Structures are given as C-alpha cells and as structure tokens.
Image: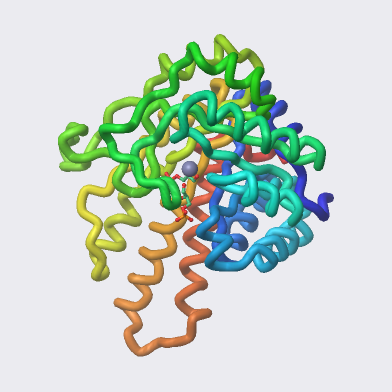
C-alpha cells in the first residue's frame, strides 16, 4: 500500500523486462484523476500521472499534488507524479522542490549541445533530490504545450546521437520521435489512406528507428509522446452532438501494443481523455438541455474516462496486474 508518489525507476525496470509499458496520463482536474486511478485500481496497474505547465497554470500546483496524493491514498497503487514537457530549469526545480517524483526537461527544439547542457543541469539537481528525469531527442510534429512544431520541421530521432546524449546527460529515460505527434490530428488526410468505411489509416510508426535506438541503449527505458489513438467512437459522439472534428486521427492501438513489448516503457496519453470527456459532456447536454448540475454531466464523463483507461491498461499497455 503506497501513500506517497514513487519514482519511475522500479516501474520502468519491471516494464522493460516484462514487455509492457506504463501509461502516463495527463491530469487537469479531479474527475480526470478519479477516472484514471479508479480504472487502474480495478485492474491493479501502476501509473504515471503527469502535469503539464498548462495544467499547473490551470489548476494550481498544490491542488494537483493533493489530488494525486488523494488518489494514492484511495487506491494504494504505485503512482509517479511527473512534470510533462518542462521547458526550463526553473520549472523543473519548482516541481522537484514541490513534491514531484519525476520531471521531463524538453529541450528537444534546441541544438544538441544546448539540449545536453540543460538536461544535464536538471539531472544534477533532480538526482540530488531523489527525482528522475525524462529527456527528449528528436522533434514531434504538432503542438507541444506552447511550442508549436510544424509537420515539415518534424524530424525523427537520429539513433547515432542517443548514446552520447544519455551518457553526457545522465537522464533516466528518453523520449524519441518515431512518427507520433501531439493532439487529435496526428496526420493530414493526404498522409493517410482510407479503409472501406472511409476511416483514415495513418502511415506506420518508424519501428526501425526504435529498434536502432534500443540496440544502442540496451535496457534503457524509451518514452513515446503523442500516443493517443483518437478513438473514432468519441470523435463520432462529439460530431453527432454539435462538435466539429472532421478527420481527427491517431496512432493505431496495435502499433502502441507492439511498442510496449519492445523498449518503450512509458506511453503518453492526453488527447484520448479529452475526447472521452468532451464527447460525454456534449452527449449529455444534447440529451438533457434542461439540466445544469455539473455533477450530472461530469459523472458520465468520468465513467467514460475510466472505461477508456481500463481498456488502455489491459489491451494496449499490457500493465494490468503489474502494480
Ligand atoms: O503534450 C502535451 C499534453 O497533451 C499537455 O497539453 O499543454 O495543453 O496541457 P497542455
Ligand atoms: P496525445 O496528444 O497523443 O495524447 O499526447 C500526449 C502527450 O504526449 C503528453 O505529453
Ligand atoms: Zn508530449
């Protein structure tokens, strides 16, 4: 029974050896924390709850810490509290000083040597305080918090750089770019084909890049950002209830499943939670225009997040029963 957040060290070691991945879900409010952690409790899965700079600005550091602590007390699960896309030493320091057990320093948009220097600085401070660090090499297309990266600028991780980067920085895990991207529009329709139902089928992830990275970093945990699969069930629910999300497309779950059996130990999911929540609330409003009690429309939203997360833990990440 855990009462405080843990680091990801032990979870990643077990995930690497066991051929599964830990789900890293973004949290912004109580219902999201509850939906995710109730699912994990039901299937006994370890978890990473992650907070972006934007989440911290929205909900406040103390509220988020206390919500996560409450979830640990309620579930007794091993849960890491992680800063997602930290963009400066100061932000990472503030989270380390304020009770996070893991931070990401995302200097992937900087030149290699600057990325190394900033990551190294964060690693030194974090390790002195018992906190682990995720770094990033390569650039994902799409929107990363406030950093907008256009599809043309996206570049896969260069495997020949990873050993030098990890040995110079001392980071504990590494996010790489193999074709995932943030948000609900991961590919344009002309980058995809369409199946018989007219649903977009995206190009496959670059497993060759992942394999090359893993060969150079045996036993080292790899992280995938931008790993929402954009469930068409929720896109449809949104579109049928007043929303407008044409051609939203994500990463097929079979590809994430495959990545989880390889060296990928952490898979980041945020957009799918947003789609589940938004779809549920839109449907409730469309069906009950007279209702105005937030508990009534947040309840189905929380329940759908829970079902979605349970499915991810069991069928995609493979981490059910591993807490
Ligand atoms: O990678 C970005 C995450 O989905 C967090 O998004 O910065 O809007 O909270 P946010
Ligand atoms: P998605 O937008 O695919 O959910 O990615 C989330 C993420 O990478 C958070 O860091
Ligand atoms: Zn991300």
Determine which quarter of the picture holds residue 8: top right
Percent coordinates x, y for residue 5 in the rendering: 76, 50
User: Is residue 43 among what the camera can see?
Assistant: no
User: How was this image coloured?
Assistant: rainbow
Q: Residue at x 24, y 70 (%)?
A: 242
Q: Residue at x 51, y 72 (%)?
A: 299
Determine which quarter of the picture holds residue 151: top left
Q: Residue furthest bottom?
A: 290
Q: Which residue is more in the foreground, 89 or 203?
A: 89
- Considering the image in quadrants, where does the C terminus appear? top right
Q: Residue at x 69, y 54 (%)?
A: 94
Please give left or right for residue 53 compared with residue 205 in the image: right
Percent coordinates x, y for residue 233 in the rendering: 33, 53
* Above or below, comparing residue 51 to residue 288 in the picture: above
Q: Which residue is more in the foreground, 298 or 25?
A: 25
User: Is residue 304 among what the camera can see?
Assistant: yes
Please give left or right for residue 78 compared with residue 294 in the image: right
Percent coordinates x, y for residue 129 in the rendering: 81, 42
Number of on-image labels: 0
Percent coordinates x, y for residue 108 in the rendering: 48, 33
* Above or below, comparing residue 205 to residue 145 in the picture: above
* Above or below, comparing residue 203 to residue 70 in the picture: above
Q: Residue at x 41, y 29 (%)?
A: 255
């Amino acid at each position: 029974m855990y009462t405080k957040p843990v680091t990801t060290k032990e979870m990643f070691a077990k995930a690497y050896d066991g051929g599964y991945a830990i789900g890293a879900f973004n949290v912004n409010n109580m219902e999201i924390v509850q939906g995710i952690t109730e699912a994990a409790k039901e299937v006994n899965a370890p978890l990473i709850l992650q907070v972006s700079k934007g989440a911290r600005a929205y909900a406040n550091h103390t509220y988020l810490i206390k919500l996560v602590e409450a979830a640990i007390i309620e579930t007794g699960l091993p849960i890491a509290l992680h800063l997602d896309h930290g963009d400066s030493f100061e932000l990472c320091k503030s989270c380390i000083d304020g009770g996070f057990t893991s931070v990401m320093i995302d200097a992937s948009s900087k030149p290699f040597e600057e990325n190394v220097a900033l990551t190294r600085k964060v690693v030194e401070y974090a390790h002195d305080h018992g906190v682990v660090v995720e770094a990033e090499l390569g650039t994902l297309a799409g929107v990363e918090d406030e950093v907008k990266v256009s599809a043309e600028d996206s570049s896969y991780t260069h495997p020949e750089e990873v050993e030098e980067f990890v040995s110079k920085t001392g980071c504990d895990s590494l996010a790489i770019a193999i074709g995932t991207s943030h948000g609900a529009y991961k590919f344009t329709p002309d980058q995809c084909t369409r199946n018989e139902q007219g649903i977009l089928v995206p190009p496959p992830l670059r497993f060759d890049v992942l394999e090359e990275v893993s060969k150079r970093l045996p036993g080292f945990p790899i992280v995938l950002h931008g790993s929402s699969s954009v469930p068409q069930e929720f896109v449809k629910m949104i579109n049928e209830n007043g929303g407008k999300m044409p051609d939203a497309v994500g990463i097929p779950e079979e590809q994430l499943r495959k990545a989880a059996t390889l060296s990928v130990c952490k898979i980041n999911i945020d957009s799918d939670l947003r789609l589940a929540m938004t779809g549920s609330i839109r449907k409730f409003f469309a069906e009950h225009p007279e209702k105005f009690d937030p508990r009534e429309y947040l309840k189905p939203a929380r329940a759908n997040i829970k079902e979605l997360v349970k499915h991810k833990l069991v069928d995609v990440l493979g981490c059910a029963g591993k807490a």
